[in-house]
Amino acid sequence: MKVKNDMTADFLRQAYSGESMAHMRYLIWADIAEQEGMPNIARLFRGIAYAEWAHADNHFRVLGEQKGVYTVAAGGVFGVGKTVDNLQGAIDGELHEVQQMYPVYLEAARFQNEKEAERSFRFALEAEKIHAELFKQAQDSARQGKDMELDNLHICSVCGYTGTGEAPDVCPICGAKKEKFKNF
Ligand SMILES: [Fe+2]
Ligand SMILES: [Fe+2]
């Protein structure tokens, strides 16, 4: 069994659920940005949706053999609006993860000596910081009624690290090789 303590397992299930909702929500908001004539913001949503998938995938796998049906309480942002409003929802969700959720989950995993959960939470925490910044840039453009400027977007399939331009040879968060990056 990969995770030994109930509290860390609860946090993994909550984080998995939160990331799953973020993944889906960003795909919905991407379609809205596309319809509003903002293809780069749509691409940002789709790329970051992939990063959230990577986080959900990591958390789910760390739960390993903890089988069963669980009702999970997880924070999720709701609301369908204009892209500028949807981006506010995205910023709020990312900042919640960066400032509250993941720092607490990470400390709990450290306290319980859950190495794999600690790794999974740390990857997500570091990637979400970048997401919040990218969504703020997108919102600045959307507020002016413009699409954002956005170079190639590369996402690390191992940890969800998100960058623009040419992908690095080695992921700055997890150390994965360039081949592990997916471009959007
Ligand atoms: Fe994120
Ligand atoms: Fe990575």
Image: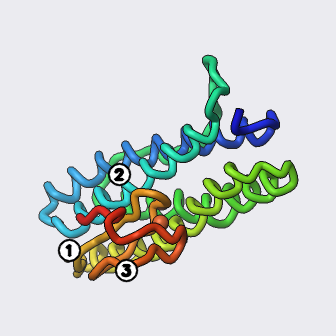
Residue nearest the viewer, comparing 38 with 169? 169
Residue 177 appearing in the image: yes
Which residue is painted at 45% across and 51% down in the image? 54
Q: CA distance from mark 3 to mark 2?
A: 25 Å
1 and 2 marks in contact (CB < 8 Å): no
Q: Nearer the viewer, residue 1 or 52?
A: 1
**Could you say where residue 33 lies in the image, as x and y percent from the top left?**
22, 59
Quadrant housing residue 150: bottom left
How many angstroms separate mark 1 from mark 2 (CA)? 16 Å
Q: Residue at x 56, y 59 (%)?
A: 124
| First reached walking from the N terminus: tag 3 or tag 2 | 2
Relative vertical location of residue 17 with respect to residue 50 in this rendering, above or below: above
Task: Count residues near mark 2 (Cα–Cα under 10 Å), then give few for <14, some for 14-19, many for 20+.
Answer: many
Q: Which residue is mark 2?
A: 26
Q: Which residue, as the protein is rendered here, is positioned at the far right?
A: 111
Compared across the picture, whether 148 is left or right of 61 comes to left
- For the residue pair 11 and 175, the one nearer the viewer reads as 175
Q: Amino acid at mark 1?
A: Asp
Q: Which mark is residue 168?
A: 3
Q: Are marks 3 and 2 in contact (CB under 8 Å)?
A: no
Q: Position of residue 81 (x, y in %)?
A: 32, 52
Mark 2 is on which residue type?
Tyr
Q: Secondary structure at mark 1?
A: loop
Q: CA distance from mark 3 to mark 1?
A: 26 Å
Badge 1 is on which residue?
Answer: 147
**Is the C terminus in the top left, top right, bottom left or bottom right quadrant?**
bottom left
Identity of the residue drawn at 20% across and 74% down: 147
Camera-nearest label, 3 or 2: 3
Left-right relation of 46 to 5: left
Give SS at disc 2. helix
Of residues 41 and 3, the one nearer the viewer is: 3
Q: Is residue 85 visible?
A: no
